Amino acid sequence: MTQARAGRAAHAANRVRELALGARFALTGGREGWTRTLMTAVGVGLGVALLLATTALPGALAARDARDNARNDYGAQQVSAGADTMLLARTDTVFGGKDIRGRLLQPEGDRAPVPPGLSAHPAPGTMVVSPDLRALLESPGGKLLRERVPYRITGTIKDAGLLGPHELAYYAGSDTLKGHEALDADRIDVERIKSFPDKPLSEPIDPILALLIVIIFVVLLLPVAVFIAAAVRFGGDRRDKRLAALRLVGADSRMTRWIAAGEALAGSVLGLALGTVFFLIARQYVGEVTIARLNIFPSDLDPSLGLALLVGAAVPAAAVAVTLFALRGVVIEPLGVVRTSVPRPRRLWWRLLLPVVGLGLLVPMFDKGRDTGFYNQGQVIGGTVLLLIGVTALLPWVIETVVRRLGGGGVGWQLAVRRLQMNSGAAARLVNGIAVAVAGAIALQMLFSGIEGDYVTSSGEDTARAQLVVPMSANLSKAEQERREANLKAVPGVTGTTTLGNVGLHTESKDPESQKYVEMAVGDCRALREVGELVSCRDGDVFVTSGGDFGGDGAAPGAKLFFETPSQGGRPGTQIPYTVPRDARVVPARVDPMGTRRGGLLATPGALRGLTKVRVFSTTYVTTRPGDPLVADRVLNAAWAADPFTQARALDDVKTVARFAGVRRGLYIGAAAVLLLIGTSLLVSMLEQLRERKRLLSSLVAFGTRRTTLSWSVLWQTAVPVALGLTLATGVGLGLGAVLLRMVGRPIHVDWTSVLGMVGIGGGVVVLVTVLSLPPLWRLMRADGLRTE
């Protein structure tokens, strides 16, 4: 037993010595060795940098959410005024399509809560702003916004009070909020608070979104792993020749493999260091990048220690494993490497086994949907990874099978085909990463398209009939309402306005719970035609609508109703009786511009003469001239000038669930980072292949081969594997997408425009990288490249 343990210890010590010897060769092998090691380190470092950023991203988003929760002023309990309370009005607005978070503050005592990011409450008429809002207000383009946010700037919101460095936000002091927390509560968003609730605003995540997040991480990280695996094999051909020399001086085949693994280990460890440097440099500039309206502070991008240590251990281990695996079929002899002979055909059965097993893991989860709990994440990750890894396993076989049958054509084509026939594995490694990325992107796009209807739905608002809505104060005099509407009409770019009032009534009943609520829309005949299909109309008419979504129960000609009036000073409001005229005509209800089909009554102003105590809430719909980018901001300015508490806004055709929008933004950020990595890694890989073939290219030029012929041969060597890889990726991506759709219980549908777009992006990246590699190629095609020392 002791002898066996000693044997294992000696064996392990030998492996360590061989790894150390390989690392020494990599670091002390002269210019050639340093160049090869540096290329490997750069390729690995790029992948490590993205892995570190990925491990840091969940923490960054969590820190962002924590700041959002800390300043959350929704859900505060209603309290009585005191020394520790504050009145707060929400004055959010939009400028130039960008959201601006606004708050008016009026402390009611010296112990009133101070929002995060502020050291004290701003004085009335002053404000504290975010850095980007200050820059916007002080720029020529912020002239319109200064009219809507006219307060004097006295300070800057610190990072603790902002979601990100580019958020537009302000806190302004006010002394006019008193009384508004009770008056016009349906129109003005004013609350009295004594603390910030620190409650999350978003709803819990559902199983389908959880599945989507898992798939996003797999799709974005797997290409990184593939690129790292390819990077540790840079310089494979020259390395094999060095290993043959080692055999000549007495090393056995196993020792040479572990020495090669030691060289890869040295490159990967140096890559870890470079990746850390790349990450730290990129982190300093992450605050300047905004993707899908999301940006984060550099300090938030702090990798988890456990995950960072996992990356630090996994990358070198993967480098050793990949190298040993790559050399398993290579016979290294003292006089050469048998790889240069014609290899036997690659086996197909085990390559097909990977996606088959992946399907076997995912199929049991078909039609699970949202209502049967969360998906088994380990099973989802395993099945998805095996399906996508199937691309990397099948691609070498596909390329080898296809190029074996190619021939004929020009000299450039024949050179390219012969090169691919001799070493199709290198071509596959070059394309593997982009193929996996495209396959994952196609599957992800199909899943997004299948579930998007659950999270991005029609708002019902009709932007063809109106573009903005301006709520007005209750009980405005007719003259004041007409003045405000005239001001809106006078805004440059406005083509028309329609004002509709709204009044609440209820049926007669001694039991309040059995009363029925009745809506009444008030406006002139033109306005009433927005909510009812009127054949004829004149001032003084009253109509009863049919087919409304709500507010119609109890409305009928001759019905006795009561207007609802607000309570005042703690006293209950009075009930004003109203009898619907018996000659009121019944008309079909029509959906209004905000997507509501109102039931109840339609009344012209003449029908309510004498009812001066009735409280009418008015809303003006504004139509604008198409193509004017500033008209919406001018309308919002006019609405603010008439009422600083206005909740005027632009109408929107769709509404998106906040959680889904956040996941989509995260995908955009990750996709942009992976696309950058793909392009950079491909360029490094292509330059490494060109460097290895420097002597061959110089020899061909010395024998009179035209440079254009060699350039075309390099282009064909890239184009053929890319075409085959993208074709395979499209098939696997469509298959995985169909499986994911079945898992969430959605019909299988392929958006071919999106699929072709994904393929086009992948091909475009390769084309761009190939074009960028041409100048180095032309420099290598010189006869002096044959010179040696």
Image (cartoon, rainbow, N blue to C red):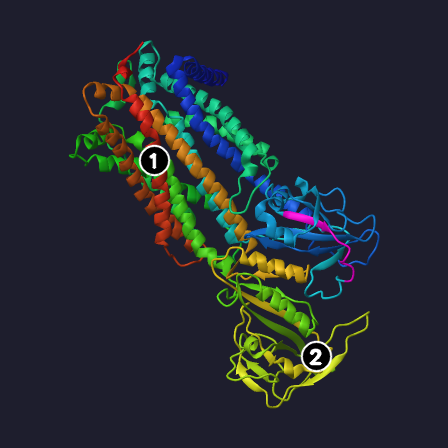
Q: Is residue 688 left or right of residue 169?
A: left
Q: Is residue 356 visible?
A: no
Q: Is residue 452 left or right of residue 644?
A: left
* Residue pointed to by mark 1: 431
Picture quadrant where residue 524 is located: bottom right
Is residue 674 in the magenta section?
A: no
**Residue 253 % position (x, y):** 34, 17
Q: Nearer the viewer, residue 377 or 299?
A: 299
Range of the magenta residues? 169-179
- Label 1 Cα crowd, 10 Å radius (few <14 / some 14-19 / many 20+): many
* Residue ID at (55%, 39%): 57
Q: Assign the C terminus to one quadrant of the image.
A: top left
Res. 766 mark: none
| SS under mark 2 | strand
Q: Is residue 602 visible?
A: yes
**Residue 98 % position (x, y):** 56, 51
The first of marks 2 and 1 along the sequence is: 1
Kind of residue sitting beneath label 2: Phe
| SS under mark 1 | helix
Res. 563 mark: 2
**Residue 329 % position (x, y):** 31, 26
Residue contact at pointers 2 and 1, CB within 8 angstroms: no
- Label 2 Cα crowd, 10 Å radius (few <14 / some 14-19 / many 20+): many
Instruction: Spot the residue most to the left.
Output: 408
* Residue ID at (38%, 57%): 748
- Whole-Å distance between the Cαs marked 2 and 1? 73 Å
Picture quadrant where residue 727 is located: top left
